[in-house]
Image (cartoon, rainbow, N blue to C red):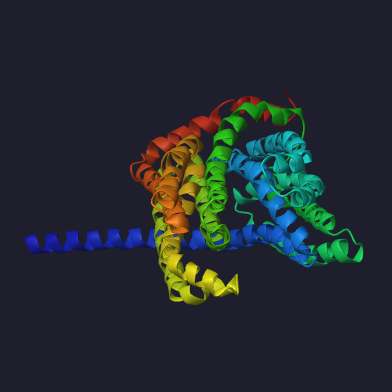
Amino acid sequence: MEETLLLKKSSENKGVETSKIGVLLQQLKKLSLMAGPMVVVTVSQYLLQVVSLMMVGHLGQLSLSGVALATSFADVTGFSILTGMAGALETLCGQSFGAEQFHKLGNYTSCAIISLILSCFPISILWMFMDKLLILLGQDHAISLVAGKYCLWLIPALFGFAVLQALVRYFQTQNLIFPMLLSSVVVLVLHIPICWVLVFVLGLGQDGAALSIAISYWLSAILLGVYVKYSRACHKTKIVLGTNALRTIKEFFLLAIPSALMVCLEWWSFELLIILAGLLPNPELETSVLSICLNICTLHYFIPYGVGAAVSTRVSNELGAGNPQAARDAVYSVIFLAFIEAIVLSSLLFCFRHVLGLAFSNEMEVVNSVAKIVPLLCLSVSVDSLLGVLCGVARGSGWQKIGALTNLVSYYAVGLPVAILLGFGLSLNGKGLWIGILTGSTLQTSILACITAFTNWEKQASLATERISEHDEGDFLAHNGFA
């Protein structure tokens, strides 16, 4: 009798374990199907600026230097801010979709489009005086003039980017990946001849390169907008721009501001790292090596960012639907996926460390220096793999304020001071700077990992319900023309 009970209990335990594995595998499948296309979408949008920069590179060193400087400035002061602000929709739209409050997606997206466009005006004013600001900061006069003019032509791209970022989050939170994938790839393919014609055929030079980016961003936004208008898939969540959208502006900005800080504080710290490298004893070598490492990290980050976007949608949808267990399973699955990706990528980088620098430079001194710093780069890639998905969990759960505070402490109270101490105080130069920023990334990842591990997901589901239920009746009436 006792043996029978033990066998029965053992069988039940095995069944539970098998069931758990099955659930995790199912979550992994859902995440992978969404993460892969999201990586393509993100990379395609990023390559628009890269293609333009490559075209400008054939115009001469002055044009290339000016556009490279302008691109960095524009990313820091404009595109990063808009990207961060749009992250608020991953919480608001994702949880609303999960709760089947479909009308709220249109309201939130409309509010985001209007808010992001309004945010473009002060950024545009800053860009108008960029050449003077760069000269004031001690940059080369000729390069600053080229950069300033390039940013003027880039202003239309800023507005197109604002609309596009809101629409991307709108589609992402509904798991409508194919329209984004198709439009982003088509626009990237079209961008190459458009940029070539503007730069070389019409003789607009670097100004044409900036204009081509604006055309491509707006074309992407228009294609997605047409899909929203005419597709049945978006009928329940239709976007109607109007005064009703402003009813949610307070709710949007309460998440958009910390969301922007969450992105920008990390982004800016890496830009400061390059500036600090220029103050080292051998600035050309150190700046080149750190720039190569930063480019590799940036290219790699699109993978965990895409996976993070997928888990953000899964978590926000499940919390909105009141399924805390499913949200928890999605988190466990994505962390497992991040570990696998980290091991594979870091192993590849380490194996090819002696030839990695040749992809960026023919100078053997640079190549050898890159090989020496690759072990640290492997650690950075591993940390970024986890960090990218944990940030996705944070956006899906609505933890943007926690994320912003974590970034502030990790990078500015710890990471950068350690970088300055090691790089300058202990004369470790570029390696010391990178160790410092790696320390900041590791601390940020550790904090977010602890918060995630000790999260009460039942409580998070309740908070999501409260968030999407607030003023819901008024929103519904306004959406249907009764208020």
Residue at 77% from the left image edge and 38% from the top image edge: 129
Residue 398 or residue 361, whichever sits in front: 361
Position of residue 420 relative to residue 3, above or below, is above
Residue at 70% from the left image edge and 43% from the top image edge: 134
Q: Quadrant of residue 23?
A: bottom left
Q: Position of residue 460 (x, y in %)?
A: 43, 37
Q: Quadrant of the C terminus?
A: top right
Q: Is residue 26 visible?
A: no
Q: Is residue 65 left or right of residue 35?
A: right
Residue 116 or residue 183, whichever sits in front: 116
Residue at 78% from the left image edge and 59% from the top image edge: 63
Q: Residue furthest left?
A: 2
Q: Is residue 424 left or right of residue 468?
A: left
Q: Position of residue 137 (x, y in %)?
A: 66, 41
Q: Is residue 83 left or right of residue 52?
A: left
Q: Position of residue 119 (x, y in %)?
A: 71, 35
Residue at 81% from the left image edge and 57% from the top image edge: 206
Q: Is residue 393 left or right of residue 252?
A: left
Q: Quadrant of the N terminus?
A: bottom left
